[in-house]
Image (cartoon, rainbow, N blue to C red):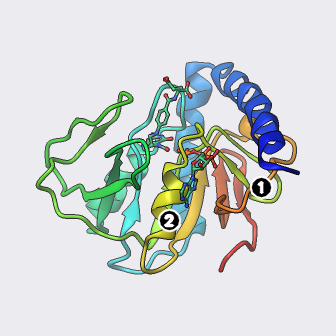
Amino acid sequence: MVDAMIEEAKAALRLEAHAKRAALGANRRAEAAKAVSDHFFESIKLTPGDIVAGYWRIRDELDCQAILIRLMDSFQPVVLPVVMGPDEPLELRVWEQGAALYPAGFGTLAPAELAPRAEPDIVLVPLLGFDAKGTRLGYGGGYYDRTLVQLKKRPQLVGLAFSAQEVDEIPRENHDVPLDAVVTEVGVRQFGNGA
Ligand SMILES: Nc1nc2c(c(=O)[nH]1)N(C=O)[C@@H](CNc1ccc(C(=O)N[C@@H](CCC(=O)O)C(=O)O)cc1)CN2
Ligand SMILES: Nc1ncnc2c1ncn2[C@@H]1O[C@H](COP(=O)(O)OP(=O)(O)OP(=O)(O)O)[C@@H](O)[C@H]1O
């Protein structure tokens, strides 16, 4: 498939995934976030000191705040992403326990400009949709793809989602970095996409 056709197919899948995610009620969202947190800590192997990149929920994304707080409570370092510009990789800033967060665009919060940066071992990836092969559909900014290619070591990529966000096969472009796993309220799916 040529890139223009892939972009068209992705645009249609984005609309579908948007609608499916928006249709979930507040109770289901909260229950799912709790279940995802439980599955994450039961199934994803963490080594002490592993740095975990989280995200600050935008609109109706699955909320990973409970996971991040529990990680910080057990002294596992956490970073949050900041968009620096449309063609830039994300800046990953360390969120020290109890440190203030500031508006960072798109309704997100992030640590202060002076917070230290760190390269993650595990990335909790927000997403609009995913497919059975672990291909991810984001908002189309390419931020995660750009960020991941410039890290020294490829981290473990764990998508977090509601199970309703699974869509038919998402066409993959060369720059699309596939997920290693997706955690939903139903459980953990491993994809064997690892480098
Ligand atoms: N929680 C969270 N944080 C994140 C991301 C994410 O997907 N989720 N990002 C992952 O890259 C980066 C932010 N990228 C974003 C890109 C587009 C839109 C957005 O709202 N797009 C609109 C259309 C554009 C517009 O509003 O004009 C949309 O999709 O409706 C938001 C965040 C970094 N932080
Ligand atoms: N490694 C890269 N280097 C330069 N540009 C890139 C890279 N990866 C992606 N892009 C650009 O980003 C655009 C959007 O990519 P894509 O549709 O895969 O975004 P997405 O994964 O849905 O978005 P996001 O990661 O922000 O949630 C691509 O058309 C491409 O121009």
Amino acid of disc 1: Arg
Q: Position of residue 56 (x, y in %)?
A: 38, 40
Q: What residue do we see at 60% from left, 54% from top?
A: 159
The quadrant of the image that shows the C terminus is bottom right
Q: Is residue 92 left or right of residue 14?
A: left
Q: Is disc 2's CB within 8 Å of ligand 2? A: yes
Q: What residue do we see at 40% from left, 46% from top?
A: 66
Q: What residue do we see at 57% from left, 23% from top?
A: 27
In 3D space, how far apart are the residues under numbered discs 2 and 1 (Cα atoms)?
16 Å
Quadrant of the image occupied by residue 194: bottom right
Question: Could you say whether the residue bearing mark 1 is in a helix, strand or loop?
Answer: loop
Q: Is residue 191 left or right of residue 99?
A: right
Tell me the crowding category of disc 1: few under 14, some 14 to 19, or many 20 or more residues within 10 angstroms, Cα based. some
Q: What residue do we see at 35% from left, 79% from top?
A: 48
Camera-nearest residue between 99 and 168: 168
Residue 193 in sight in this render: yes
Q: Is disc 1's CB within 8 Å of ligand 2? A: no
Q: How many marks?
A: 2
Q: Position of residue 116 (x, y in %)?
A: 17, 63
Amino acid of disc 2: Leu
Mark 2 highlights which residue?
A: 148
Q: Is residue 172 above or below residue 148?
A: above
Q: Is residue 112 above or below residue 57?
A: below
Camera-nearest residue between 23 and 126: 126
Quadrant of the image occupied by residue 11: top right
Q: Position of residue 141 (x, y in %)?
A: 53, 41
Mark 1 highlights which residue?
A: 172
Question: Could you say whether the residue bearing mark 2 is in a helix, strand or loop?
Answer: helix
